[in-house]
Image: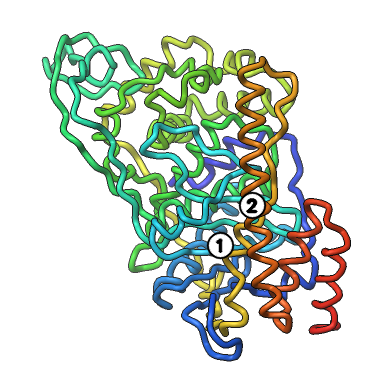
Amino acid sequence: MRLKLLGLALALLPLPALAQTAPAQQQDAPIVVQGSLDKMSGWHVAESDHVIVYSDGPKGELTRITHNLERLHFLLSILLNRVDKPDDAIKLRVTLIGDTAEFYAMELRNTRSEQGPFARAFQMQRYYDPRDDGAVMAGSRTDMVAAIEQTVQVDLASLGVLQMNPQTGQLENSLFGPGNQNLTVTTGGDTLGITAEGRIYAGFAQHYLLTYFPAAYPRWYLDGFGEMFATIRVRPDGALEYGHMPQGYRRVIEAYGQVPVKDVLTGKYLEVAKKSRWTPLHAWILTHYLFFSEERRPQLSRYLAAIANGDSLEEAAKAFGNGAKLQADVIAYDNRALPYDRMTYPPDRAPEPIVQQLTEGQARFLKGRIELGSRIELPPPGADLDPKSAERAAKYRAHAIEARDKWLARLRETAARYRSNVEAQLLLAEAECRPGNHDACAAAADRALAIQPG
């Protein structure tokens, strides 16, 4: 067992955990859809020691996911040496929203967190906002399907996907490596299933890392860290397994090809990321190798520590020594059976959550609470940009202002119809305060206090 892997990987980061204190009102106010306010809704909320999860899906599914998130919290606490340490962090609030179309219709934007950027098929898989009053995360309850490749002629060898093994005479996968065979194939419109649960578990792992070990992590590492735990498995005997190969990994690598290791470590892959082949699975294999390699794990710690101390990515990458040797090692690692870890633990360390059904009054404004950050936060004005970029930034900002004002107008109308709903007035108060509408904010706050003086 390598139960110390992640703790060792981060052992040299000299940064303390961030403690957050939750306002009492936020802790006691579950918010969520429609109908008379005292009737029961189709929404449930599950709460455990570290997460609060809302869902309009099956109660059993909600219970399982919430319980697994609590298990994952305990697993990460063991691996990162945080078991039984003081913990006053605000509980993460996760909302599981209908199908993929319903989730995308909310037009959520990750304004204070970033993923990737990934190739088109892997963009925007979950929403995360590390808000001052507690982080929120949202995603679809249903699995997604990614079209990983259109029908096209691909020279696999030139992309570094395949290379000849001189000992066996067979072509092998060589992620991150140069190919040496002039082989061309035609790939059809291949698709890949992306599980909804996997996105939630990956996002939770990233949230854990950023909450208890805040640092200026390179983006590829955050992506890979999340993917390490996206495939967490709970065995019938209760044991937890992490580090399993993601579904469709080999097909994705064959479709998207190489991203040189040195370009990843130095951040250069981001310069062409939007039209590159970078995917969450590329991040997974590199992170997986660095974690599971006895030789490379200390180097990863030095790399991360250097970045946390303000060194450039180029300078930090020197911690890995010879770049060509590292790339060759990743290729060799990717061409063999990849390891995973298993951990047993006392079940009472990750108890089952408490589940309650929400009334329609409690449920009505849950989506609005999630949308708030994306709707109210505006993109920067684009100062100090070249003329064309500044023009694009100005148009984007103007569009965001128009969308915000329309959303706010709809919220005002809805809140006016539900003047006795404290959740409506709390949401409206925050939505008015953030853009500086102080009088309207105070009026909504007064209405909330009149409904619920405490």
Find residue 253 and report its horizontal and vertical position in percent: 29, 29
Looking at the rendering, which quadrant does residue 289 occupy? top left
Which scheme is used to colour this image of the protein?
Answer: rainbow
Residue 233 visible, this angle: yes
Outermost bottom residue: 38
Distance from label 1 to label 2 (Cα)?
A: 18 Å
Q: In this view, does 246 lie to the left or right of 31?
A: left
The dot on residue 375 is 2
- Residue 369 lies, with reference to residue 335, above or below; the image says below
Question: Mark 1 vs mark 2: which is more N-terminal?
Answer: 1
Rendered residue at 67%/61% (across/down): 409
Camera-side mark, 1 or 2 = 2
Q: Mark 1 is on which residue type?
A: Val
The dot on residue 94 is 1
Q: Which of 289 and 385 is in front in this view?
A: 385
Rendered residue at 60%/54% (across/down): 77
The dot on residue 433 is none
Q: How many labels does the image show?
A: 2
Q: Mark 2 is on which residue type?
A: Arg
Secondary structure state at the residue bearing disc 2: helix
Find residue 90 and report its horizontal and vertical position in percent: 71, 61
Secondary structure state at the residue bearing disc 1: strand
Find residue 16 and report its horizontal and vertical position in percent: 76, 43
Rendered residue at 47%/30% (across/down): 290
- Residue 435 lies, with reference to residue 186, above or below; the image says below
Rendered residue at 47%/54% (across/down): 201
Q: How crowded is mark 1: few (under 14 residues within 10 Å), some or many (20 or more)?
A: many
